[in-house]
Image: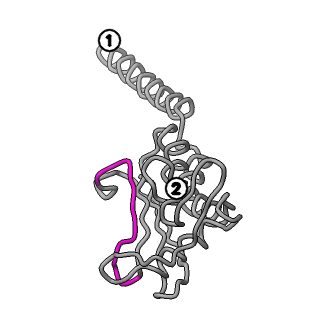
């Protein structure tokens, strides 16, 4: 009789241990932070919203929008990437130059400046490129060598019409 009673006690202890184990697992699952839907939404929408705002941003180059200046550069670029001299001329009290200089100058360029003050300062990895739809590059900048090596990549491409054909403006956030 004692052996059956001992076996029941051991079985009871085993059941209590299993219940405690399940309670502990439930506690850990309820207290750990799941991936926040807001954070997922943020990174999913970031490329689209950034490009939308960037292309509609009014510059101090004759109050033209960034999208218009990109179209101007694309309209005056040949298939080798060379620019003609008919680009929009911009000037203000601090600087002057063509639309290409206004957008892409390494020191004063609007686009680099925007990405450095937003994505770089927030430690967000990105690739940004402007290219003709047939693949000829106009300009690009990035904070990483290649986004495809990253675990997650969210991307968006907007098309801008130029006199030389459609231009793809692409932002990848990784």
The residue under label 1 is: 2
Q: Residue at x 50, y 45 (%)?
A: 119
- The x, y position of residue 117, in whole percent, is 54, 42
Mark identifier at residue 96? none
- The x, y position of residue 170, in whole percent, is 46, 67
Q: Residue at x 33, y 83 (%)?
A: 79
Badge 1, how many Cα within 10 Å: few under 14, some, many 20+? few
Answer above or below: position of 10 versus 140.
above
The part of the image, by quadrant, that contains residue 149 is bottom left
SS at mark 2?
helix
The residue under label 2 is: 111
Q: Residue at x 49, y 29 (%)?
A: 28
Answer above or below: position of 8 versus 38.
above
- Distance of label 1 from label 2 (alpha carbons): 83 Å
In this picture, which residue range is highlighted in magenta?
133-145
Q: Is residue 137 magenta?
A: yes
Horizontal side of residue 42 vs 127, given as left or right: right
The part of the image, by quadrant, that contains residue 1 is top left
Q: Does the magenta stretch include residue 168?
A: no
Q: Residue at x 49, y 82 (%)?
A: 75
Q: Which residue is more in the foreground, 11 or 83?
A: 83
Horizontal side of residue 13 vs 37, given as left or right: left
Q: Which residue is more in the foreground, 114 or 9?
A: 114
């Amino acid at each position: 009789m004692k052996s059956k009673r001992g076996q029941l006690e051991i079985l009871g202890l085993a059941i209590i241990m299993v219940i405690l184990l399940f309670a502990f697992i439930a506690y850990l699952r309820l207290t750990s932070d799941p991936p926040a839907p807001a954070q997922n939404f943020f990174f999913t929408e970031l490329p689209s919203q950034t490009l939308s705002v960037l292309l509609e941003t009014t510059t101090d180059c004759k109050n033209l929008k960034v999208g218009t200046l990109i179209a101007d550069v694309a309209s005056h670029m040949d298939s080798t990437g060379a620019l003609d001299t008919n680009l929009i001329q911009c000037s203000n009290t601090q600087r002057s130059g063509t639309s290409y200089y206004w957008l892409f100058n390494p020191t004063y360029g609007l686009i680099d400046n925007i990405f450095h003050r937003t994505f770089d300062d927030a430690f967000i990895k990105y690739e940004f490129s402007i290219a003709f739809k047939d693949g000829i590059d106009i300009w690009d900048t990035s904070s990483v060598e290649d986004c495809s090596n990253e675990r997650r990549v969210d991307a968006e491409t907007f098309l801008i019409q130029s006199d030389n054909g459609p231009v793809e403006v692409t932002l990848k956030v990784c």
